[in-house]
Amino acid sequence: MTGTTTLPIGSEVTEGFVEIDGEGFYLIPDVDRMAPFLMSIVSDSDHWMFVSSRGALTAGRGSAASALFPYETDDRLHHAAGVTGPVTAIRRMVADGTELWRPFRDAARSEVRRNLYKSVVGNQVLFEEANATVGLTFRFRWSSGEPFGFVRTASITNTGVHPVRLELIDGLLNLMPYGLTPVLYSQMSNLTNAYKRSEMTDVGRLAVYTLESRVVDRPEPAESLRASVVWSTGLDGTVTLSPDAVAEFEAGDMPEPVGLVTGRPGAYLLSGHLEIPPGETMSWCIVADVGRDQASVTALQRYLRS
């Protein structure tokens, strides 16, 4: 998806209020040079989200028992960047090979600026990393709403004067199936992993995250009949549910599509090739929700099919 953006270039920003897509945001420049802090993101429904200024988050609907990402304390969230929630790695094609860029995870450098924008009404947060060396700015924004759940909109802008060719992996890690309580997975995390199932459906790019059964120690039927779901739009390429795909990409490979993963934490990762002209922006969305029953998943499949 190609478009334009009204956001300021990273090297020119200063602290204060800015307007993005007609909405007011407060900008904190160079957020990585501050001590990490926790933000709450509100919604007009039952969505809740707590986001570390380093990028990791926990989110869900209603209560902590309906979490899309593990419900953790803020000190643990600050150390979970690249492990829980969004993860991105970008390879730029250069004359003598490729250059790897890992937004919000690489060590801070003078030519890189990391900025944070939070909407004045508190319902959105936007992360921005501007890399002057490669002439690229990567951004992602979290928002929520009915009926789809949580929406992560990501984009790459070519701020240079020449076209760029990129290989990219971007997505979400440590997604939770519905039906695990914080007490259960904090005390028996490896045991709960054994019950997890991540599976692509035959419709679009919809993935479903479920428990093979409820975690019980009694010999009785204990079905888990609700699921977390993730789907995406706007970026052509491969979808893999394997969390190993990030390490494979950073080692120089392009991940293969994996449509079924069992016994491991959930992941949803997009990978592909991009070519971006000067001044242009490529953007895409990943949408996630929790607590969907069978009828709701079927309705979402019909929507995506149409």
Image: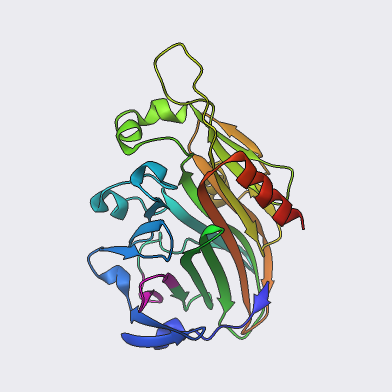
The image shows residue 73, relative to residue 33, as above or below, that is above
Q: Which residues are magenta?
A: 109-128
Please tell me in which quadrant of the rendered image residue 96 appears: bottom right
**Residue 18's quadrant in the figure?**
bottom left
Residue at far top of view: 219
Q: Residue at x 47, y 61 (%)?
A: 102
Residue at 57% across, 45% down: 245
Could you tell me what secondary structure mostly forms the magenta stretch? strand
Answer left or right for 123 relative to 183: right
Look at the image and tell me whether residue 43 can be seen.
Answer: yes
Q: Position of residue 5 (x, y in %)?
A: 56, 83
Q: Is residue 36 above or below residue 126?
A: above
Confirm whether the magenta stretch covers residue 2.
no
Vertically, is 182 above or below 129? Answer: above
User: Relative to the observer, which residue lies in front, 14 or 220?
Assistant: 220
Q: How is the image coloured?
A: rainbow
Out of 170 and 301, give the one closest to the viewer: 301
Residue most extreme to the right: 306
Of residues 267 and 292, the one drawn nearer to the viewer in this rendering: 292
> Residue 147 at x, y = what percent?
56, 59
User: In the image, residue 29 lies at what x, y percent?
Assistant: 33, 79
| Residue 241 showing in the rendered view | no
Magenta span contains residue 115: yes
Q: In the shown orientation, is residue 190 left or right of residue 160? A: left
Task: Tell me if 282 is positioned left or right of 13 in this view.
Answer: right
Q: Does residue 156 sit above or below 101 in this rendering?
A: below
On-image quarter of the C terminus: bottom right
Label count reads 0
Counting from the top left corner in percent of width and height, residue 299 is at 67, 49
Q: Where does the N terminus fall, quadrant-wise? A: bottom right
